[in-house]
Amino acid sequence: MTVPGRAGELPITNLDHEATSFALVFTVTGATPAGTDGGFSQMEANLEALGALLGVRHRLMSLRYEAGSIVRVADVTVTAASEPEVNTGAARAKFTAIVEVPGVYWRDETITTWQGSANAANQAVTTLAGSTAPITDSLLRVTGPATNITLRDVATQGAIGLLTSGSNSITASERLLIDAAAMRAAVVTTDTWDLATGTDKTGVISVFGPGSASRWIHLTPAMAVGDPFSRAVLISCTATGTIAASKLEIRTRRSYL
């Protein structure tokens, strides 16, 4: 988009990432499940087994990547596959499959829970350190007492909170649950992460800042100046009427490009 009186174009930031695709190259041999050489017939059986795995269409396929201590997972769909190139004499075949990651990002395999303060700025979410992509599906929980609660992602300045009018506080026996992926909120009275067990508060949630028209808070990593190996997610939580027992918790998985 051009702007009169400004050279070039108006930059647009905070855009969502596109779905990504990449190729998987398979070399299939005649190895049996026991590790022995089963020859050409076993190679054909292995090809059929792999084809059955890649041919699933009723659900997404879970893809796992390992490199030493690094483990990443992503749900993918197979969009294309080549015909196998078969070497009959060597009992080997080679083919390529193209997979797409509809959810864009690689994720950690396990979910973690972080705890911080219900009234503190620029808190480092240590369990999300090292992420390279925004975390779009966090569960956030604020334990009361707390009034006028606002959560803000420091990197993007996207924020979410209870409206400042009406029912905008929680007591010491209550917890405000926010599901960023489903864009829902509830107040519960037990130690749970299940919004269905509480009182719906979605209608009194206020979302503001960049991207607020189409999303709830996205936790976004930012690099430290001059140190690309230091990637931290910072969050601010402000509220009034808090005590030492008031706290903020975040349950999610790290995200990677």
Image: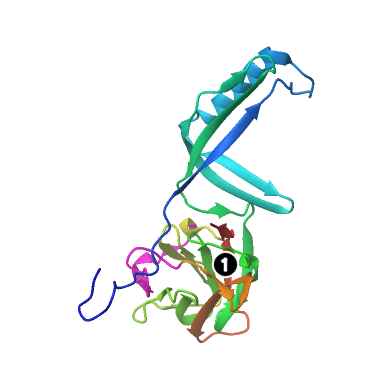
Residue at 52% x, 54% y: name it: 105
* Residue 205 painted magenta: yes
Which residue is the extreme one toward the left?
4
Q: Is residue 28 left or right of residue 177?
A: right
Give, as a single range, the part of the protein colored magenta: 197-217
Q: Which residue is mark 1?
A: 250
Residue at 64% x, 17% y: name it: 45
Which quadrant of the rendered structure holds the N terminus? bottom left
- Say few, some or many: other residues with alpha carbon within 10 Å of mark 1 (under 14 / 14 to 19 / 20 or more): many
Residue at 56% x, 63% y: name it: 132
Residue 70 x, y percent position in the rendering: 69, 54
Q: Quadrant of residue 64?
A: top right
Residue 96 x, y percent position in the rendering: 54, 32
Residue 103 x, y percent position in the rendering: 47, 50
Vertical order, 2 against 47 (above or below): below
Res 48 visible: no
Front residue of 257 and 149: 257
* Total numbered circles: 1
Front residue of 190 and 13: 13
Residue at 55% x, 47% y: name it: 74
Vertical order, 122 against 218 (above or below): below
Front residue of 144 and 3: 3
Vertical order, 168 against 44 (above or below): below
**Residue type for callout 1:** Ile
Res 252 visible: yes
Which residue is the extreme one toward the bottom?
241
* Residue 175 painted magenta: no
